[in-house]
């Protein structure tokens, strides 16, 4: 079974440009999460999808970030326009189960990350 | 929200030595995972361990949920163990966000 995949693995863009990151979760996983680690800091939650719905987007830093998950399969995270402080590693994760607490605790599976460098 | 604290922040070991990494969390959690971020930045799942003890080769982990801590043991460390070890818990207070600790940066010397 394929794991969580992310594309691209590395992106270098100039300040002010737009970048779109893609995440393909494990097949059948309803839950999809985005996280990021900016240089030297902690890994921070960005948002959580249950199928195509945004369950929690409290971690999105500002309106330059837009996440979508059309059809409840893969997800994209667009940064427009990119700023220097957006540089870091963006991780995607997925997990099985639904979007309520009845599902119980489940393991999250992380992708390899996309390293974004804004110059 | 839940606070996650890891210790020590940095650790230098001689190859072959053993070590214990600690993760404390401030409230009851429904999920706990340990990860290793390798020098290429990839997050590798080590353990999914909401409670109890698990072992995988030279690594083992114990979570005592009632006392709000988890331990990661590394035995006979190797240079390839170098990297950052993260503890992460799932906070159900406002959704299912995962809260990461700041990590323990491990360097194993040959």
Image (cartoon, helix red, strand yellow):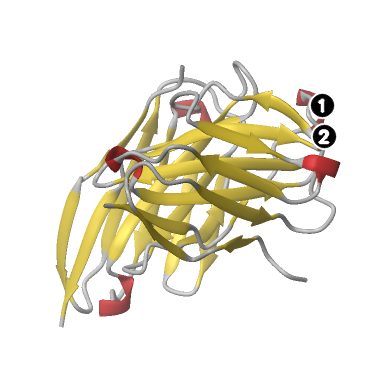
Q: Which numbered disc covers residue B44?
A: none
Which chain is home to disc 1? A
Image depth: mark 1 or mark 2 in front = 2
How many angstroms separate mark 1 from mark 2 (CA)? 8 Å
- Can residue A107 be seen at all in this image of the molecule? no
Q: Residues within 10 Å of mark 2 (few under 14, many from 20)?
A: some
Q: Quadrant of residue A117?
A: bottom left
* In the image: residue B64, left or right of residue A42: right
* In the image: residue A86, left or right of residue A7: left
At a point 25% along the width and 78% down the height, the residue shown is B79
Q: Quick one: quadrant of the N terminus of chain A? A: bottom right
Query: Which one is in front, A48 or B33?
Result: A48
* In the image: residue B46, left or right of residue B38: right
Q: Which numbered disc covers residue A98?
A: 2
At a point 23% along the width and 78% down the height, the residue shown is B16
Most distant residue in the front direction: A16
Residue at numbered disc 1? A102
Q: Residues within 10 Å of mark 1 (few under 14, many from 20)?
A: few
Q: Quadrant of residue A103?
A: top right
A63 is higher (above) or lower (below) than B32: above
* In the image: residue A3, left or right of residue A70: left
Residue A34: give x, y in percent of width and height.
56, 41
């Amino acid at each position: 079974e394929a794991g969580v995949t992310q594309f691209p693995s590395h992106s270098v863009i100039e300040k002010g440009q737009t970048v779109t990151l893609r995440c393909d979760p494990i097949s059948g996983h309803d839950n999809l999460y985005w996280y990021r680690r900016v240089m030297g800091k902690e890994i921070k939650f960005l948002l959580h999808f249950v199928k195509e719905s945004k369950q929690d987007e409290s971690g999105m830093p500002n309106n330059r970030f837009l996440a979508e998950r059309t059809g409840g399969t893969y997800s994209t995270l667009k940064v427009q326009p990119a700023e220097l402080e957006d540089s870091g590693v963006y991780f995607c994760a997925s997990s099985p189960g639904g979007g309520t607490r009845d599902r119980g605790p489940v393991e999250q599976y992380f992708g390899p990350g996309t390293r974004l460098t804004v110059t | 929200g839940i606070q996650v604290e890891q210790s020590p922040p940095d650790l230098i070991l001689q190859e072959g030595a053993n070590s214990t990494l600690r993760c404390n969390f401030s409230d009851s959690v429904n999920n706990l995972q340990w990860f290793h971020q390798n020098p290429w930045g990839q997050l590798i799942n080590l353990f999914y361990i909401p409670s109890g003890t698990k072992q995988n080769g030279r690594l083992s982990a114990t979570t005592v949920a009632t006392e709000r801590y988890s331990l990661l043991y590394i035995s006979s460390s190797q240079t390839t163990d170098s990297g950052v070890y993260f503890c992460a818990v799932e906070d159900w207070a406002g959704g299912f966000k995962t809260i990461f600790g700041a990590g323990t940066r491990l360097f194993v010397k040959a």
